[in-house]
Image (spheres, rainbow, N blue to C red):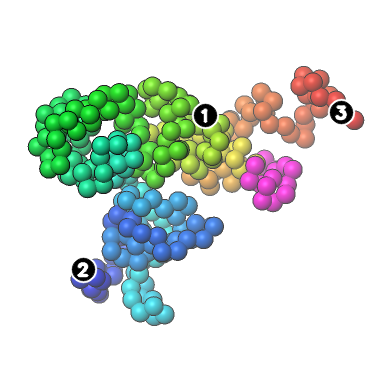
Amino acid sequence: MIVKIKGRQFDTTQTQHRGPLQRVKFRNDGGFTVCEIGGVTCVGVIPKANVGAEYLLTGEWEENLKFGGWQFVFKSYECFVNSQHGLKELLVRECKHIGPQLASRLVNKFGDKTMHVLCTDPASLTLVAGVSQNIALAVNEWAKAERSNLQLKERLYAIGMLPNQVEKVINQYGHNAEEKIRKDCFSLTEIKGFGFKTVAKIADLLGVPKTDPGRIKAAILYQLNESCEEGGHTHLPASELIREVAILCEIGQQSIEPVLEAMIKKGELLTNETDWKAYSESNGLVLS
């Protein structure tokens, strides 16, 4: 069946829908989201919805009789970072000479080569309306000074990070931050305000494998902390912990067990078989 939504036609027999996320209409603490993607109202669970990113949804069309229209109810999704969105955000938020309209004109003119042009070819910038020679030179100086971290900043803005979050990442790692983060991405969880789920998005962006031991270790600590804070537990059975981490990381349980065993062996996690006397002496604790 073909339906028309905002002047566009959609085939309701299709099980996938793709488009940019334009706005979030409703979202609860559990991630249940009502949003507009590609001009269509879409309903499903998205832990963190990134306006400007492109989504591929899998689910089915449904006619909502209460609100009188068609919507796409999705069960799963893939998120594709919109690099141009990140680039525009970077230019507007960090270069004082560029506003939203000029950022759009620059990106529309030079596309993925925008940063290269800003860093190496100020003369070409003057071909864009609103860019004088003085502005072109000033922007060029800014781009050259920031060059080592521009690509990482662009990606971080593309996934919806705010300037203070981007600044924290750069301050933590300095120049060539992306290279350092690739080696140990989940050390980012040491920064205040960077929880596991935020860092997992950065890891996905940088191509860090789902089975990366650092990711699994961070997920284990995150899950234990969640269980403590939300459920009031002081411990978790290993089988339950492994199952929850597997769901969180979207990997098989067999990938988690070696990491868990290594953490126990190093004393990073305690079990009911821990030698408490030896542990307390090695850590300067007193058992009462």
Amino acid type, callout 2: Arg
Q: Can you see residue 56?
A: no
The residue that disc 2 covers is: 8
Give the x, y percent position of residue 186.
Answer: 50, 32
The span shown in magenta is 225-239
How far is disc 1 from disc 2 in space, using C-alphas? Answer: 46 Å
SS state under label 3: loop
SS state under label 2: strand
Q: Earlier in the sequence, mark 3 or mark 2?
A: 2
Q: Earlier in the sequence, mark 1 or mark 2?
A: 2
How far is disc 3 from disc 1 in space, using C-alphas? Answer: 32 Å
**Residue 253 appears left or right of 148:** right
- Identified at 32% across, 46% down, the residue is 80
Q: Earlier in the sequence, mark 3 or mark 1?
A: 1
Quarter residue 95 falls in = top left
- Identified at 47% across, 32% down, the residue is 168
